[in-house]
Structures are given as structure tokens and as C-alpha cells.
Image (cartoon, rainbow, N blue to C red):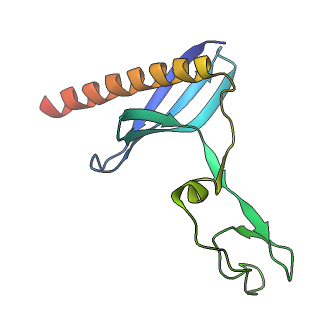
Amino acid sequence: MQITEVKIQLKEDADKRLKAYAVVTFDDVFVVRNVKIIEGKQGLFIAMPSRRIRVSCPKCGARNDVTNRYCGQCGAQMPPQPEKTPEQIQAEHKDMAHPIKQEFREYMQKEIIAAYEKARSSAGEGEQA
């Protein structure tokens, strides 16, 4: 499987860790949207699209974010959550799509970050003109 196109949407606030979003097309037939490009302590990396884990309300059964204190449907108090470590907070999100093999993740990261750098330098040239 090959990446056939990467579209980059740069974020306005360059001081934040989130630098851009990418839309990645594979073999001209499959698209993954909302791949995040993030500035970490050891440089840029990609984060796959994810969503928050949801839990059921004990009273009405409605699905709520795991961090909600009250049900968004019926207003009942949700069971209290114990204090969480940073790893547990990060585990409140599940990837919607992700590479299974490390080699493919590295290939994706290399291609997406290269497209990001190209988009960033093109945006910089446009500002200087």
C-alpha cells in the first residue's frame, strides 16, 4: 500500500503543539482524515484520528464521555472517576484507524511530515512575497 496524496491544513497558532492536520490518500482509493501533526519533546510526530471513550449512564443508559460528571441526557450523576495518571488520561481516546506494522507507521510519518514541511515552507514563501 502506497500513499498517493497528502493534503496538509496548517494551524494558525504556531505556538501550540498541534501544528497541522493531514488528509492521507492510499492507492488512490482510501482516505484517512484528521491525522494530527504534533510537536513533541523529540520533534514532530503523527497521531492517528481518535475519539473519546464513552460510558453508559447508570440511570438512562445514554452514552457519555468518560469524564462527564452528569449525564447529558437525564442529568443523573455519573459514577465518580478516580484520579488519573497522564497515561490513563491518554487512554480515554481510541484510535479510529491506525497502522498495524511499525514499518508502515514509520513510512506514514515520514511522508506526512515531509508534506507538512513542504506546506509550511510554501506558506512562509507566500508571506514574504
Instruction: Please state the horizontal and vertical placement of residue 57, each as a whole percent of the image.
Output: 81, 76
* Quarter of the N terminus within the rendering: top right
Say which residue appears at 58% left-offset and 72% top-offset. 83
Tell me if 20 is positioned left or right of 118 in this view: right
Instruction: Please state the horizontal and vertical placement of residue 20, each as a whole percent of the image.
Output: 41, 39
Instruction: Please state the horizontal and vertical placement of residue 92, each as a whole percent of the image.
Output: 64, 57
Q: Is residue 32 above or below residue 18?
A: above
Say which residue appears at 84% left-offset and 79% top-offset. 58
For the image, the number of numbered tags is 0
| Quadrant in which residue 120 is drawn | top left
Q: Is residue 122 above or below residue 90?
A: above
Tell me if 57 is positioned left or right of 68 in this view: right
Q: Is residue 13 above or below residue 117?
A: below
Tell which residue pokes out farthest to the left in this image.
128
Instruction: Please state the horizontal and vertical placement of residue 62, each as a whole percent of the image.
Output: 82, 73
| Quadrant in which residue 53 is drawn | bottom right
Foreground residue among 86 and 122 = 86
Tell me if 44 is positioned left or right of 66 in this view: left
Tell me if 41 is positioned left or right of 22 in this view: left
* Quarter of the C terminus within the rendering: top left
Foreground residue among 34 and 53 = 53
Say which residue appears at 58% left-offset and 66% top-offset. 84
